[in-house]
Image: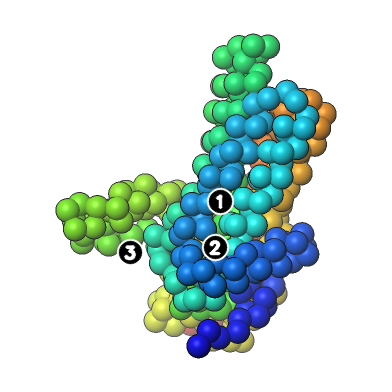
């Protein structure tokens, strides 16, 4: 018999949810998740559908026609409801896997590669190869912004919900897993880990103070689950930073993209990511690293 799952039960945490997600994307994703569960569609299939929609949106942004651009915006919003639905469906059905998380994390990359390519092809007659250089630099920054926002959000979830409820990965564990499987028997997983392990390593390299705190927690408590009192103290310091991780995620980017398309100046979107979002990334990392440094000092002082 199918059990009833409420909307609240499909959310990761109220701490990490953005207002527009709570108002629109999570309710919409919840309804799609209920539909997909009813027809026995698995979360990874929903993720693939979101990729198809997001890539189609990028194709439509190639054209100068505003109505085609608006159609692309609608497809991108639809893709993001599926991006919400796949995680909610996974939590409804208990169909969690590292492969699913990797695929889900890469969905947005497929969207934005298509969006970048569509904009570049549209502007090449006027800009020449320079628009591709601008897009390449912007794409690198976009990747770092999204990766670090996701990492800090998942570290916050690790602290407040514990290791069993967290999706935060560890480079050493990923490297060990990749070495333990073969291309012949686990080819697809090994392929994913070949790219995902270095991605996780780069996230760890950008957060040295957080890593020191993480090691102190492991040494002090024999794992990554902290006593509830200490976890709540860290949560109080970490929670205000979650708004910055959200600003570096989909909704802010989509708003800037849509404004630039309505203005008929899609290159403005690249400039926005290079300036505003890079400043925001720098500020977020600086503040969060200092939070981790203070908390690590406090934990060491208790020894």
Quarter of the image holding residue 112?
Answer: top right
- Asked which secondary structure carries label 1, the reply is helix
- What's the residue at 46%, 59% (across, down)? 44
Asked whether the residues under the numbered discs 1 and 2 touch, taking CB atoms below 8 Å apart as contact, a structural biologist would say yes
- Asked which secondary structure carries label 3, the reply is helix
Residue in front for this viewpoint, 89 or 9: 89
Pick whichever of labels 3 and 2 is earlier in the sequence: 2
Numbered disc in front, either 1 or 3: 1
- What's the residue at 58%, 45% (across, down)? 53
Whole-percent x and y of residue 274? 66, 34
Give left or right: position of 107 versus 255: left
Give left or right: position of 109 versus 23: left
Residue assigned mark 2:
86
**Rendered image: mark on residue 173:** 3
Numbered disc in front, either 3 or 2: 2
Residue in front for this viewpoint, 291 or 173: 173
Query: How far apart are labels 1 and 2 at the CA level?
Result: 9 Å
**Rendered image: mark on residue 50:** 1
- What's the residue at 43%, 49% (across, down)? 199
Dot 2 alpha-carbon crowd within 10 angstroms: few under 14, some 14 to 19, many 20 or more:
many
Whole-percent x and y of residue 77? 69, 49
């Amino acid at each position: 018999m199918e059990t009833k799952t409420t909307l609240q039960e499909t959310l990761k945490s109220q701490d990490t949810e953005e207002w527009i997600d709570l108002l629109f994307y999570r309710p919409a994703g919840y309804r799609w998740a209920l539909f997909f569960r009813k027809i026995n569609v698995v979360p990874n299939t929903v993720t693939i559908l979101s990729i198809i929609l997001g890539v189609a949106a990028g194709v439509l942004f190639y054209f100068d026609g505003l109505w085609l651009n608006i159609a692309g915006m609608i497809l991108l919003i639809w893709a993001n409801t599926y991006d919400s639905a796949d995680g909610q469906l996974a939590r409804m059905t208990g169909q969690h896997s590292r492969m699913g998380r990797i695929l889900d994390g890469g969905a947005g990359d497929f969207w934005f590669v298509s969006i970048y390519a569509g904009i570049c092809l549209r502007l090449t007659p006027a800009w020449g190869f320079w628009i591709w250089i601008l897009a390449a630099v912007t794409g690198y920054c976009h990747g770092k912004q999204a990766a670090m926002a996701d990492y800090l959000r998942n570290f916050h979830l690790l602290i407040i919900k514990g290791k069993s409820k967290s999706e935060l990965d560890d480079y050493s564990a990923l490297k060990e897993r990749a070495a333990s499987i073969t291309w012949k028997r686990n080819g697809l997983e090994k392929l994913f880990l070949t790219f995902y392990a270095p991605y996780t390593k780069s996230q760890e390299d950008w957060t040295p103070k957080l890593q020191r705190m993480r090691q102190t927690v492991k040494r002090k408590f024999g794992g990554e689950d902290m006593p509830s009192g200490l976890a709540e103290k860290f949560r109080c310091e970490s929670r205000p930073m979650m708004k910055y991780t959200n600003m570096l995620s989909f909704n802010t980017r989509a708003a800037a993209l849509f404004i630039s398309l309505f203005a008929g100046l899609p290159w403005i979107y690249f400039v926005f990511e290079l300036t505003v979002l890079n400043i925001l990334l720098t500020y977020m990392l600086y503040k969060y690293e200092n939070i981790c440094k203070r908390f690590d000092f406090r934990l060491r002082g208790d020894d």
